[in-house]
Image (cartoon, rainbow, N blue to C red):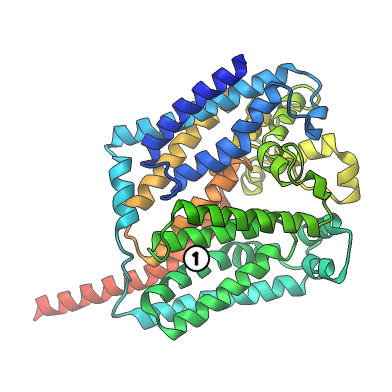
């Protein structure tokens, strides 16, 4: 009862702080911070933390954590995240003079403005060129697989888990082409093309949007991963909301939720899951939502500093570790190898990703946890403020949607990607370069024109 009271008090404080920091927590007007609250923290972490501290979880991963002390420690640390993270966002906004409610509502309601009315053909040529590269990258990814898991499943294969791992780790092609152009860029470009198609109603944009959306569904479903296609569909829904193509209502949210759960259950059934687990709170899709993301955090607490030394920065991206001659080691992969060596040996295990404080703890113990919460609050505040003050055009809005979806996903994936993320940097460079190449050309032409006129 005591834990439940603490949980409710923390939840009330967190809701208030997130509402102030995000400008809105309404599910009818979703934003970056509301998705972090609802998905990354409340559903994926906070509910499970109460089940675990009260020992009502009965979750298979928690059998690997025999020390009950970590159940309480983990609960306290998750509660700190729920309060300190939004408080940091809010205080930084107040320091800068940013009114989140005013800024967000203004951005949400204003129409999308098309850039380059005179240079629209040049922009389309550059954008379609980058899109062609991405479409070819998707085809390249499919050709470089020994077997496409989705097709093998349709053919009747029953070894879905191993097929998924082989598709990821047994890929025979260039990983950069797959990860950057196929997996990351294609969905982003499809969002931008969809916005242009909606605003211009031009056939060339409609055709390009259809091709990119189709390729995005291929690349988010081919390896049987369940979350990529759901998050891609969510990004398209969010895009439709932000451009005014769809207006949310509670009835529509209910219908979307029912359709989403039906699709999720269908995917679990297709992968051979036991139907009796579908409605269980600690197994199947519901258990995956409430416990699978947060339970590995407690495994991190049990492992690092006890059975395994702290990583002390080894989880930084490989490019940084190479500069300091340090071996790269993600905590989720280390934990998987320690707790489930047989699955790693069989090639059916991936990583034990969890709330970002798990990786922070694995590297720098409890001081790392506190510093990571403060850092994440500042990171979210800066990203949110920047995008709300950028022009609401298809390019900037497309990137905003991308980060609005992918930042909450990464919050329950690790911490060091928020310090230096080569993938986010590269895709930002590719997308923004298409926009700024035209901007720079316009600036140069205006300069030459004005200079010539002044000279005469």
Q: Could you tell whether 242 is left or right of 252 in the image?
A: left
Residue extending farthest to the bottom is: 203
Q: Could you tell whether 456 is left or right of 188 in the image?
A: left
Assess disc 1: are there few (<14), some (14-19) or many (≥20) residues with their C-alpha within 10 Å of its C-alpha.
some
For the point 8% across and 81% down, the residue is 456
Dividing the picture into quarters, in which one does residue 139 lie?
bottom right
For the point 67% across and 34% down, the residue is 294
Residue extending farthest to the front is: 251
**231, above or below 380, in the image:** below
Residue 366 in sight from this viewpoint? no
Q: In the image, residue 328 lies at what x, y percent?
A: 71, 42
**436, above or below 82, in the image:** below
Q: Could you tell whether 195 is left or right of 290 in the image?
A: left
Location of mark 1 (residue): 430
Q: Which of 298 and 180 is in front in this view?
A: 298
Q: Which element type, helix, strand or loop, lies under badge 1?
A: helix
Q: In the image, residue 272 lies at what x, y percent?
A: 84, 55
Q: In the image, residue 225 lies at what x, y percent?
A: 72, 57
For the point 47% across and 65% down, the residue is 431
Q: In the image, residue 245 lies at what x, y percent?
A: 41, 66
Q: Nearer the viewer, residue 148 or 454?
A: 148
The N terminus: image quadrant: top right
For the point 40% across and 36% down, the residue is 19
Residue extending farthest to the top is: 2
């Amino acid at each position: 009862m005591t834990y439940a009271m603490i949980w409710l008090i923390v939840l009330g404080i967190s809701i208030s702080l997130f509402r102030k920091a995000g400008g809105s927590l309404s599910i009818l007007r979703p934003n970056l911070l509301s998705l972090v609250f609802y998905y990354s923290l409340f559903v994926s972490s906070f509910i499970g933390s109460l089940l675990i501290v009260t020992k009502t979880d009965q979750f298979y991963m928690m059998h690997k954590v025999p020390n009950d002390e970590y159940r309480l420690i983990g609960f306290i640390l998750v509660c700190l995240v729920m309060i300190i993270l939004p408080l940091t966002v809010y205080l930084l906004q107040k320091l800068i003079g940013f009114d989140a409610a005013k800024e967000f509502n203004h951005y949400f309601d204003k129409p999308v403005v098309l850039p380059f009315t005179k240079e629209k053909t040049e922009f389309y040529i550059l954008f379609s060129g980058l899109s062609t590269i991405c479409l070819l990258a998707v085809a390249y990814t499919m050709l470089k697989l020994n077997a496409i898991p989705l097709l093998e499943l349709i053919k009747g294969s029953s070894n879905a888990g191993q097929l998924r791992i082989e598709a990821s780790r047994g890929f025979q092609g260039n990983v950069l082409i797959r990860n950057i152009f196929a997996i990351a860029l294609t969905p982003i470009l499809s969002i931008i093309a969809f916005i242009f198609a909606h605003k211009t109603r031009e056939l060339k944009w409609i055709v390009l949007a259809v091709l990119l959306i189709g390729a995005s569904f291929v690349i988010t479903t081919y390896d049987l991963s369940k979350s990529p296609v759901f998050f891609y569909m969510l990004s398209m829904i969010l895009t439709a909301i932000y451009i005014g193509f769809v207006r949310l209502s509670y009835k529509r949210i209910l219908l979307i939720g029912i359709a989403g759960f039906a699709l999720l259950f269908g995917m679990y059934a297709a992968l051979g899951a036991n139907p009796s687990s579908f409605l269980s709170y600690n197994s199947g899709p519901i258990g995956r939502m409430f416990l699978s993301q947060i339970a590995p955090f407690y495994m991190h607490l049990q492992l690092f500093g006890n059975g395994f030394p702290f990583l002390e920065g080894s989880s930084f991206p490989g490019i940084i570790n190479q500069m300091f001659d340090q071996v790269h080691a993600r905590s989720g992969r280390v934990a998987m190898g320690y707790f489930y060596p047989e699955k790693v040996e069989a090639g059916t295990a991936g990583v034990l990703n969890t709330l970002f404080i798990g990786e922070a703890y694995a590297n720098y113990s409890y001081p790392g946890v506190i510093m990571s919460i403060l850092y994440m609050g500042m990171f979210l505040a800066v990203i949110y403020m920047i995008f709300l003050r950028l022009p609401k055009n298809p390019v900037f809005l497309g990137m905003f949607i991308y980060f609005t979806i992918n930042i909450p996903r990464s919050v329950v994936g690790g911490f060091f990607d928020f310090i230096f993320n080569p993938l986010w940097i590269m895709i930002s460079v590719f997308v923004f370069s298409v926009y700024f190449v035209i901007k720079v050309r316009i600036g140069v032409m205006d300069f030459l024109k004005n200079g010539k006129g002044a000279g005469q």
